[in-house]
Amino acid sequence: MNIKEKKPFSQRLLNKYRLVVLNEATYEERLSYKLSRLNIFLFFSLIAILIIISTICLIAFTSVKEYIPGYDSTVLRTNAVKNIETLDSLTLVIEKNQDFINSIGSVILGETTKSEAQKEIKVRIDISDIEFKVNQEDSLLRKVVEKEDRFNVLESATSKVKYVLISPIFGQVTSRFDYGIKHFGTDIAVPINSPVKSIAKGTVVLAEWTVQTGYVIVIEHAYGLTSVYKHNDSGLISQGDLVESGQVIALSGNTGELTTGPHLHFELWREGIPVNPENYVSFE
């Protein structure tokens, strides 16, 4: 019995083979390649190395790496931090704008929220019922200070700059501020087409005709102040205009369903809360 001798592995790698491509119909030889197991192994190894190198270069030098789960880079982290900061800034801007819209809405509609009403109740403490023991010199000094500072002065706690308010119009006060009945302003009887002035420098946020209060003008001022002028016959400014202190902004009238005669209904709001205008300006 003949035992076939097994060749060494190195020799088997070098054994020559021929790869022939024949025409099936005529058996004509078209292509012929001399191959060995070593050549085939080297060829496929080279192909695998090229594929690996191409994949690494594609991931390292292109944006494909951003789609790989768990991959992170300095650029991605920087962009993420910037996006978070931008989102926080936009959130603060939206909240601030919403507070401003709510404040202006309260002014236009003549309504206050529950929290604002509670704050107003805390502010509107009547000190007339509290007894103070003062001498004659204190009484005289108090009258002088009240006479000088009662009207037209707001003082900034930080800058110590006096903020002067002028009267929008002069006339007879027919109805005063009353928070209890939601009359958030002062009514001043004046002839029709009397000039109405802005109490201070500011920006016009509303200048429109309404059914109930006629031609209404709302102006936003510094220090959280907002002034409202209702029942005008016509307006001389438009929404978005910048007005100066004392500038004529409208002509008084007798317009709107809620009017009872020619007059100006003037309101003053501070940080979204209605305040008594007579504490800040004089109408007579």
Image (cartoon, rainbow, N blue to C red):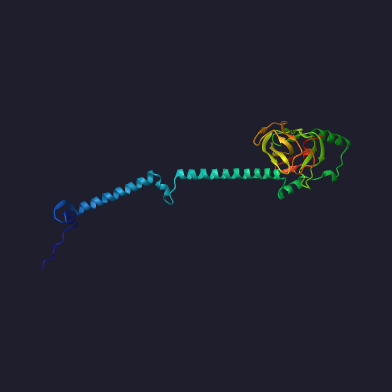
| Residue 199 sits above or below residue 95 on the image | above
| Residue 265 sits above or below residue 13 on the image | above
Nearer to us in this view, 213 or 132? 213
Please give the name of the residue rendered at 51% of the width and 43% of the height, measured from the top-left corner. 82
Question: Residue 118, percent across and down?
Answer: 74, 49
Please give the name of the residue rendered at 40% of the width and 47% of the height, measured from the top-left corner. 64
Q: Residue furthest bottom?
A: 1
Is residue 80 shown to the viewer in this render?
yes
Placement of the C terminus among the 4 image quadrants: top right
| Residue 5 sits above or below residue 129 on the image | below
Nearer to us in this view, 208 or 265? 208
Please give the name of the residue rendered at 35% of the width and 47% of the height, measured from the top-left corner. 56
> On the image, which quarter does residue 145 sit in?
top right
Is residue 199 shown to the viewer in this render?
no
Left or right, 223 with reference to 88: right
> On the image, which quarter does residue 265 sit in?
top right
Please give the name of the residue rendered at 16% of the width and 51% of the height, measured from the top-left corner. 30
Left or right, 123 with reference to 68: right
Left or right, 126 with reference to 54: right
